Image: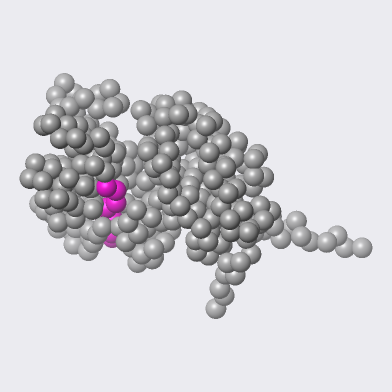
Amino acid sequence: MLSLDGSGGVVLAADLGAAHATLALCDLSGHPLAEAVHEVRLADGPEPVLRWVEQRWRAMLDAAAVDAGRVLGLGIGVPGPVDAATGRVVHHTPVLPGWRDHPVRDLLEQRFGVVCVVDNDANAMALGEYHAVGPSSSPLLFVTVATGIGAGVVVDGRLLRGADGAEGDLGHVRITSADAGPLCVCGARGCLAASASGRALARALRERGEDVPDSRSAVELALTGHAEATRLVRQAGLVVGDVLATAVSLLNPRVLALGGDLVRVQDHFVGAVCERLYQRTQPQAARGLRVVASTLGDRVGIVGAARLALEEVLSAEAVDRALAGRRQPVS
């Protein structure tokens, strides 16, 4: 048996959300040496946010007395579609104004002199959940329902990727006709996220006179037993379950893991997802399916971001390059 000596270096990770970011310093086994949650505004644009991330990472290294030369890789999850080959956001989203085609990966690689992996946050979450649960969870479908709705799929330890970085974009699956339903942030009507995301619930509660600025506030209100907030959370679960019935029929996953703000209202949201899912899915596709709330909770994104970096740093190709660089010429 071989085991990894995690002390051989460190990686830096960032899970960037619309209003909050989690940053971490981890050893090569993925164990966090430091971790912190901060408020952030991705709407400020990529340059200010990336400078802030760099500053926070360097402060973490200093506080942990870790030399910057021991950093071997960086991993970042962002709430938008990413071209994994270039590390760039592939199109404009309301959460990431000004980020489209910005060289996020290239800039951070220049600043730290190590490899950087940038991916969609739902992909990072799926990878984090897979490593927490283990290989028996494959294929794993991870769905996050918070400000928006997204998904990631892991099969035999590898992320399932689409052709253009738009895989897992469940939030923009149409659930009504093109001219019906609430207006989505993408400009279309009838998207799943416009009816069942945390942002949608917050909007609906504000229309009823509640002081609910965002997804987390809507969930907090539901957790107090507020009747209308609870009803909306359950309704969101039923609608999400409708869409996931199709995903389960297509993918036949072993585990469906749910994350994000709404999962905190487990009895109402997760229960409603399961109710509708099993109603609408053929028994063969759901026979061995386990539907669970994320085992990592709010940490799933940062664990996944660290795994993005670790899988690159510890890949066979990277190890071969490192060994080749250390070989001494024969005299």
Coloured how? Answer: one colour
Q: In the picture shown, does residue 141 fall above or below 201?
A: below
Closer-to-camera residue (199/169):
199
Closer-to-camera residue (22/114):
22
Q: How many marks?
A: 0
Figure quadrant of the C terminus: bottom right
Looking at the image, which residue is at 83% across and 61% down? 328
Looking at the image, which residue is at 62% across and 53% down? 62
Q: What is the x, y in percent for residue 22?
A: 44, 48
Closer-to-camera residue (259/222):
222
The magenta-colored residue range is 252-261
Judged left or right of residue 198, residue 51 is right
Figure quadrant of the N terminus: bottom right
Looking at the image, which residue is at 45% across and 37% down? 82
Q: What is the x, y in percent for residue 193?
A: 24, 35
* In the image, residue 206 lies in the stretch drawn in magenta: no
Q: Indicate the quadrant where residue 145 lies.
A: top left
Judged left or right of residue 251, residue 54 is right
Judged left or right of residue 190, residue 298 is right
Residue found at the very far left of the displayed protein: 227
Closer-to-camera residue (49/158):
49
Q: What is the x, y in percent for residue 264?
A: 23, 53
Looking at the image, which residue is at 57% across and 69% down? 4
Q: Indicate the quadrant where residue 42 lies.
A: top left
* In the image, residue 259 lies in the stretch drawn in magenta: yes
